[in-house]
Amino acid sequence: MGRFNQGSLVVSSSPHIMDNVNTTRIMLDVLIALIPAFIMSGFIFGPRALLLTITCIAACVVFEAGFQYLIKKDSTITDLSAVLTGTLLGFNLPSSLPFWMAVVGSFVAIVVVKQIFGGIGQNFANPAITARIVLLVSFATPMTTWPLPNQLLGTVDAVTGATPLGILNMGTDLAALPSNMDLFLGYVGGSLGETSAIALLLGGIYLIWRKVIEPSIPLAFIGTVFIFALLTGQDPIFHIFAGGVMLGAFFMATDYVTSPRLTSGKIIFGIGCGLLTMVIRLYGSYPEGVSFAILLMNILTPQIDMLLRRRTYGGVKI
């Protein structure tokens, strides 16, 4: 069908999109939502935490621009997706990680997981989560060395120690577990962007208010963790605030590309993330399971979408 103007009236064929929301606007909203956690990471772990995140961002942008230049593809760095990937990757790293390892992780996230599969919208798994798991497998000691924050000075101590989940997993000195208030504020060892639950909660509320994400996945994810912990005699508040549940539920499990399309599918996805997280935490050898849980559910997303696919009225069941 043709298109023509009649004064201020525009007549055209469908689809009719009446919205100014685009990829850049969505990515910008997510980055704005991450600002509180970024600030808290610097306050808790010191300037190096901020520099590590900035290094990841810069590396991701350079790798995306460089790869697209090599394959003679239009650059997409202005859509801010590479900036967001770098931010999330930085948030999943200990503040003491060598910068060159962060650059390796950025290469995995952008080139291996994202660009080789066709770029934004084509990756089957969350790039930042996959890169974190690759770094964890490749550089186990640096990825599990956790500087401890100094609560009085807001800087990082020279000593290192176990994360709250690490203490729980070892089951040796449970009296050393931090209070739920410390977990809520973030004065604990852990990845630099996941420790402050209040900062992540503020960001998550902003994303829901802006309608960037539906509350389905975060509520299903966090709710499942709460119920599982309650049924197994654990402190549910501890398991929600400790580790990467808040960061994963609001900022990584909700990724448009790697999560189901329908609300019912999102709920199944969130429940699966919560179940796998708690099974790994309580019965696995590794103290944290958020990254593995989200990656496994990313792989199952096409099957969830297929299972819940709506049949056209009058059509045959496939």
Image (tube, helix red, strand yellow):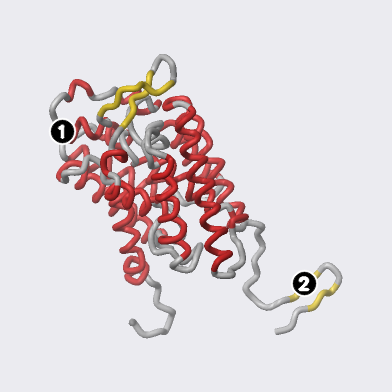
> Residue 27 appears at what percent x and percent y?
56, 51
Quadrant in which residue 75 is drawn: bottom right
C-alpha span from label 1 to label 2: 66 Å
Quadrant where the image shows the C terminus:
bottom left
Kind of residue at disc 2: Val
Residue 9 visible: yes
Residue lying farthest to the top in this orientation: 152
Q: Is residue 315 above or below residue 297?
A: below
Which residue is at a point 31% across and 38% down the rendered structure image? Answer: 142
The crowd level at tag 1 (other Cα within 10 Å; few <14, some 14-19, many 20+) is few
Secondary structure beneath disc 1? helix
Badge 2 is on which residue? Answer: 10
Residue 216 visible: no
> Residue 216 appears at what percent x and percent y?
40, 51
Q: Are marks 1 and 2 in contact (CB under 8 Å)?
A: no
Q: Is residue 267 above or below residue 225?
A: below
Most foreground residue, 86 or 222: 86
Kind of residue at disc 1: Met
Badge 1 is on which residue? Answer: 170
> Residue 109 appears at what percent x and percent y?
43, 55
